[in-house]
Image (cartoon, rainbow, N blue to C red):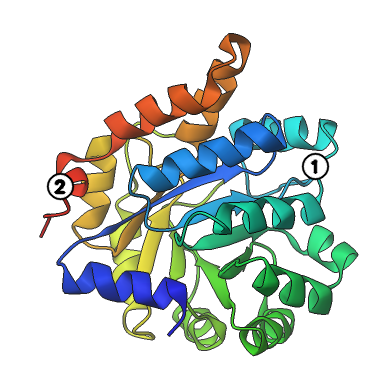
Amino acid sequence: MSRIALTFAELHSAGRKGFIPFVSAGDPDLETSLEIVHALAELGSDIIELGVPFSDPMADGPTIQASSMRALANGVRLDDVIGLSRRFREKSDVPIVLFSYLNPLHRYGLERLARDAAAAGIDGVLVTDAVDEEAAEIGSLLRANGLDLISLIAPTTSDERLAKIAANASGFLYAVSRAGVTGARAETSSSAEELVRRARKFTDLPVAVGFGISTREQIEEVWEYADAAVVGSAIVAEIERSIPSGNVPERVRSFVGGLLPEVANAGTEN
């Protein structure tokens, strides 16, 4: 059983739901980023998504685009993200998922990526723009090295495509709460719950909901119908606000600690 599968099995056994934060690796720099990831693990994150800096992150809104640009300006590349993950794994067993696009993965080399990511203790890769045959090829390479291919589904995804995506996926499905790019929203979309219900017709994999989840109330709402909630832009925005003060990890720790529902901190939610 993979580390991701084990995490969801333990959550299910305890009657709990998952919290999955996202940060861009190397934002604002690699050393601070490593401190942030450790802080997120210590706060009880069930899985951590590490964004791979990319110059054309088409699925991301302005907040995450800006974080990607800050990391790229510091010279952070995919091999640095893998190195950061390796250092994190020396002290933590929290699963790590790379959130990326095809371009940087192809540039690095897919076979090399699968081998190096596995050696670094990375658990899965989410490729936002991989579809059909390409997704099947990547999924096969990853699984041969013990990694999961995490796939995106959206409210606009047809049942036919849901079935194909679910067949290639492992670990969990990432359900986009609404059409559009990442970014905090005042309200979650009602289409997310319907999407999770449709996805469950085609797979037994856990389903996490992300894109636009930014408050404690929204996390609790997602937990009513999904297996985990993903929070990205709200955390990345706090990182950006904290950079001038120079105490980014502590600010992120305080922000995320306040974001988590009390039941998550106690580990006793239904």
Q: Is residue 87 shown left or right of residue 251? A: right
Residue positioned 51% across, 46% down in the render = 22
Determine which of the numbered discs, if any, sits on residue 251 in the image.
Answer: none
Residue positioned 38% across, 86% down in the render = 202
Q: Which residue extends farthest top? A: 245
Percent of width and height locating residue 114: 73, 76
The answer to whether the residue labelled 2 contacts the one labelled 1, judged by CB atoms less than 8 Å apart, is: no
Residue nearer the viewer, 150 or 178: 150
Residue 248: which quarter of the image? top right
Of the residues under marks 2 and 1, which one precedes in the sequence? Answer: 1
Determine which of the numbered discs, if any, sits on residue 266 in the image.
Answer: 2
Q: Is residue 113 above or below residue 24?
A: below
Percent of width and height locating residue 100: 68, 57
- Label 2 neighbour load within 10 Å: few <14, some 14-19, many 20+: few
Element assignment for label 2: helix
Residue nearer the viewer, 26 or 51: 26
> Hey, what amino acid is under mark 2?
Ala
Q: Is residue 183 visible?
A: no
Percent of width and height locating residue 10: 26, 72
Residue positioned 86% across, 71% down in the render = 109
Q: Is residue 226 visible?
A: yes
Residue positioned 83% across, 31% down in the render = 73
> Hey, what amino acid is under mark 1?
Val
Quadrant including the N terminus: bottom left
Q: Which residue extends farthest right? A: 107
Estimate the spatial distance between the alpha carbons at disc 2 and disc 1, rounded to whole Å: 36 Å
Element assignment for label 1: loop
Residue nearer the viewer, 95 or 110: 95
Residue 42: which quarter of the image? top left
Quadrant including the C terminus: bottom left
Determine which of the numbered discs, if any, sits on residue 76 in the image.
Answer: 1
